[in-house]
Amino acid sequence: MERLTQPEEEAMQVLWQLGGGFIKDVLERLPAPPPPYTTLASTIRNLERKGYLQSEKLGNTYRFTPRIAAEDYRKRFMSTFVGDYFKNSYKELVSFFAQDQKISAQELQEIIEMIERQKPPQP
């Protein structure tokens, strides 16, 4: 799937939270200042063209629903992000945040404990 632009991602975030909706629903929930209605409509049509949304005609308007789950997008985005900026290494990603003091030793320990809990038992 194609990468999302910032406005597309913002619209998708709203539609994921709502489980779908109309353009006016998205417009009401975007941060201020919201884009013009026609700009948002174009953004949503681009999302449909890219395969992220499907539409259903209801009277004179369309209701849009996500075709991809937020979690699936997040996984794909992170995989691309780590590949592009951290040489495909999650260790490099964590190291970056640790060196920039965006993550504490306590938080790193909690991550290690989460990983340890998810490991399958050793025979």
Image: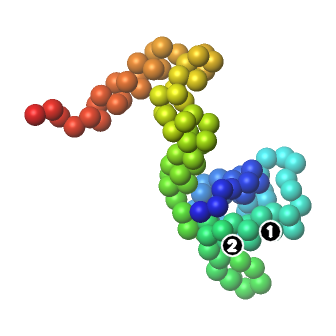
Residue denoted by label 1: 41
In this view, 84 is above or below 4 = above
Q: Please state which of residues 94 and 10 is positioned toward the viewer in this rendering.
A: 94
Query: Left or right: where does residue 117 sit relative to residue 109?
Result: left
Q: What is the residue that sits farthest to the top in this orientation?
A: 105
Residue 13 in sight in this render? yes
Residue 62: x and y in percent read 71, 77
Residue denoted by label 2: 49
In this view, 58 is above or below 103 = below
Q: Residue at x 63, y 18 (%)?
A: 100
User: For residue 123, what is the image quadrant?
Assistant: top left
Q: Residue 110 bears which disc, if any?
A: none
User: For residue 83, what is the image quadrant?
Assistant: top right
Residue 25: x and y in percent read 73, 62
Q: Please state which of residues 96 and 120 is positioned toward the viewer in this rendering.
A: 96
Residue 17: x and y in percent read 60, 54
The earlier-in-sequence mark between 2 and 1 is 1
Q: Please state which of residues 51 and 60 is positioned toward the viewer in this rendering.
A: 51
Residue 2: x and y in percent read 64, 61
Q: Three-letter amino acid code at disc 2?
A: Arg
Q: What is the residue that sits farthest to the front in this orientation?
A: 87
Q: Residue at x 22, y 37 (%)?
A: 120
* Real-space CA distance between mark 2 and mark 1, rounded to the nearest whole angstrom: 12 Å
Query: Left or right: where does residue 83 sit relative to residue 12?
Result: left
Residue 14 in sight in this render? no
Q: What is the residue that sits farthest to the bottom in this orientation?
A: 59
Query: Left or right: where does residue 48 sit relative to residue 41?
Result: left
Q: Secondary structure at mark 2?
A: helix
Q: Three-letter amino acid code at disc 1?
A: Ala
Q: Secondary structure at mark 1?
A: helix
